[in-house]
Image: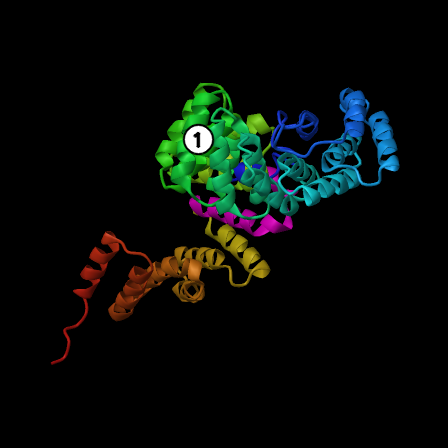
Amino acid sequence: MKLRRWLCLVLLALPLCASAKLDPKRIINESNAFLKDREPEMTDEENALYDRVVAMLAIQPQFAIKLLEGMVAENQRPSPAFSFILGNAYYASGDYAQAEARYRDAVTRFPSFLRAWNNLGVLYYSEQKFDAAIPCFSQSIALGDRDPTTFGLLGYSLEKSGNDIAAEVAYLQAVAAAPDDRDWTEGLLRIYLASGLYTRAEVLLKAMIKAYPSDGEFWLEEADVLINTDRKLEAMGLLEQAQALGIAGEDATEDLADLYAQEHLVPEAIAAYRKLMVQQRGLGEQKLLEFAQILIADHQWADAASVLDGLAAGISAERKVAYLQTRADWLMGQQKWPEALAQARAILRLAPMNGTALVTEGKAYAAQGDRARAQIAFEAAYQVPDTAYQASIELANIELKNRHYDKTVGYLEKALTLQRSAALESYLAQIRTLLPPAKG
């Protein structure tokens, strides 16, 4: 199971701003009142004009710009404070290039102009120029800005730029200052999930579920964390609880179906897949093949045939081999060996070294009494890493029937190097008793 949703939310959730609450224009507009004794002052003439246009900046930015530009025409070197206000007006009108130029002029001539740095960062953030936004927000913070939004925007910019360590620090500052702000907590959560820091992610997810119990996404993500920390039974319990509360949809049903199948809970898996088919009004090819395999494991031959027949006409080239193998498994389950052999050969025409098909071919030959051809097929499968273990067991069985005990021991020893098993070790010990005594 993948950490799909967060690594699908992962940096798509906030294309221009961290949330609907975070409006860059609001930040710009609210910065029009100066911080006394900490920022540059305008001249008397600039102040007089400012008093006339300040109320217009948010509602009539174009008209405000004309008035402000008229001032600039008379005085080609406006104060940094006036450049800042003009930058706000340009930003409000959507002229980001001019806004950038004015903010840059303000911070160049007055480097400690905190809000000019902050607004320049917001401008770059709005344009998704995150690398450029980072030093602006950093400078704003260095100058004393402790607004959680600034830390959050810096965290997101760092996250988008690939600096997860620094992003985590910034998000932590934002969360510490505004613990109820969902946006920055989600940003921190993305960092933890992307970095595989599942213990930290789990703590956040539990808090988010408590705060937003009706948001099924957090339940799904905690289930993913549990799966990735090898706690599948806990994940099943969590998803079942989410379903019982009516806050989990198709994703939870799909995850449960997969978990039930992996844990060999066949009746539960079948019920989940059936529910999923109703919810989705048809599953994708891969899910249908998985469903067919579960039905085969439960000897529900007719239902499995129905699923496979439904796939037969339109199966994609990408899943043709998987389809043919599932059909072969269905035939083998019913001991229809000639038909299963035909399916294996069809696979091998498409993929000559498909280990699973080679094992199927060997089993079909062996079931029909053709040991020689079965051995050839198993020896080929033995060369394929994914099927070497299974082929070793099959070859050991053939050599045992041929009373070649030394070869039987060799194949069993090979199998044990690939996968330890107490039962197999016991079997090997029994076969060793059949070997002739070593010559003195």
Seen at 47% across and 33% down, the residue is 221
Q: Of residues 99 and 246, which is closer to you in this image? A: 99
| Disc 1: CA contacts within 10 A as few (<14), some (14-19) or many (>=20) | many
> Colour scheme of this structure image?
rainbow
Q: Check disc 1 and report the residue beneath it.
A: 205
Region rendered in magenta: 309-334
> Can you say whether 421 is above or below 301 in the image?
below
Q: Is residue 265 left or right of residue 174?
A: left
| Residue 408 showing in the rendered view | yes
Give the quadrant of the C terminus. Answer: bottom left
* Most common SS among magenta residues: helix
Nearer to the camera, 163 or 407: 163
Q: Nearer the viewer, residue 36 or 226?
A: 36
Q: Is residue 198 magenta?
A: no
Q: Is residue 401 visible?
A: no
Nearest the camera: 313 or 28? Answer: 28
Q: 258 above or below 434?
A: above
Q: Is residue 324 magenta?
A: yes
Which x, y percent locates residue 277? Answer: 55, 29
> Which residue is located at x 61 percent, y 50 percent?
318
